[in-house]
Amino acid sequence: MISIAGRSVLITGGGRGIGAAAAFALAEAGASVALAARNEQQVVDVAAQLRDRGHTAFAFRCDVTDKRQVRDLALSAREAMGKVDILVNNAGTVTSNPLGRIKLTEWNHIMAVNATGTFLCTQAVYDGMVEQKWGRIVNVASIAGLEGGRYIAAYTAAKHAVIGLTRAVAAEAAGTGVTVNAVCPGYVDTPLTDETIARIMRRTGKSWHEATHSILEGAGQPRLIRAEEVAEAILNLCVESASDTNGQFVILDGKDTP
Ligand code: NDP
């Protein structure tokens, strides 16, 4: 059983999908967790489920695009748990449109949540981690952070920024006891992907099965990844023995499974 007992974790976007799965995985490995999202009720519910299972969990409302809210979140998480050892930058969102139809507001929003949010949250906890000579930052990027895909230019640019930030901060952190890594999943079975499939169904008249098949085929992915698989990859980057893994990314595309 992997252990991160005694560690304190802050997870953005912890109310559903990958963030909620990461909260369960890291709490079950012995950590205290603080969850943040804009929809306070969702993180409150996940934290309550964790406490019902005997874990220590807290919930906070925060929009990661707002510097003041992020600063308050870092303070609240430290106050609740005493420290922040692990940050999972998971909050993210996606839209899809051909290049010509991407509005500037859409571009700015996708960049703000995925890239700027990751920057702000990292900045808010990084010095504390360096001071305590131990820290793990795991950025939930995407395969879209490594290669281009059709109709997701804003998301692809934002996730490439997340990978760039991961590499740059990892270089800065080298030798401090803090590591910065990323996970890069393909399509994961979460509410975000449900929305993507629903959008395709609306636009094309395809059935759920056809729309799901089309995104998987386009990505060369044999199946949807489970959120728990991503959570496990996140946990593996947080353990003591991962101290030499820095500036790396883990790809989860389901291609190794039959
Ligand atoms: P979900 O939509 O299921 O969950 C996203 C979470 O992020 C929610 O808790 C949401 O809460 C939160 N969030 C969104 N915007 C903000 C914001 N501005 N401030 C704070 N929290 C925010 O998505 P997934 O679980 O699928 O995705 C999680 C991460 O994984 C994202 O970064 C996504 O890009 C990435 N990813 C997802 C893949 C997929 O196929 N699902 C594939 C590859 C990467 P709320 O709305 O209440 O704020």
Image (tube, rainbow, N blue to C red):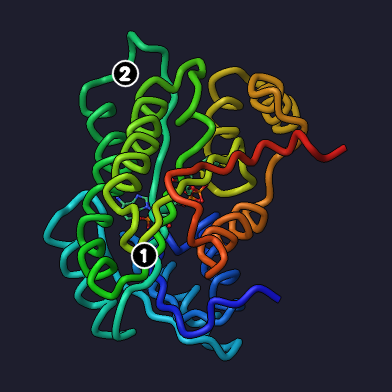
Residue drawn at 40 percent across, 41 percent down: 93
Looking at the picture, does residue 230 appear above or below residue 113?
Answer: below
137 to 98, vertically: above or below: below
Q: Looking at this view, is 139 or 200 the one in front? A: 139
**Compared with residue 102, is residue 94 higher up or lower down, i.e. above or below?**
below
Residue 83 versus residue 128 in the image, above or below: below
Percent x, y of residue 111: 28, 34
- SS label for mark 1: loop
The amino acid type, in three-letter code, at marker 1 is Gly
* Residue 240 or residue 238, whichever sits in front: 240
Residue 88, percent across and down? 42, 59
Residue tagged by mark 2?
A: 102
On the image, numbered disc 1 is attached to which residue? 177
Distance Cα–Cα, label 2 vs label 1: 41 Å
Judge the density around disc 1: few (<14), some (14-19), many (≥20) Cα neighbours within 10 Å. Answer: some
- Front disc: 2 or 1: 1
Task: Kindly tell me whether residue 35 is visible in this rendering.
Answer: no
Q: Quadrant of residue 247?
A: top left
The earlier-in-sequence mark between 2 and 1 is: 2
As shown in the figure, which amino acid type bears the numbered disc 2? Ile
Left or right for 161, reference 14: left
Instruction: Spot the residue most to the left.
Output: 68
Res 53 seen here: yes
Any mark on residue 18, and which? none
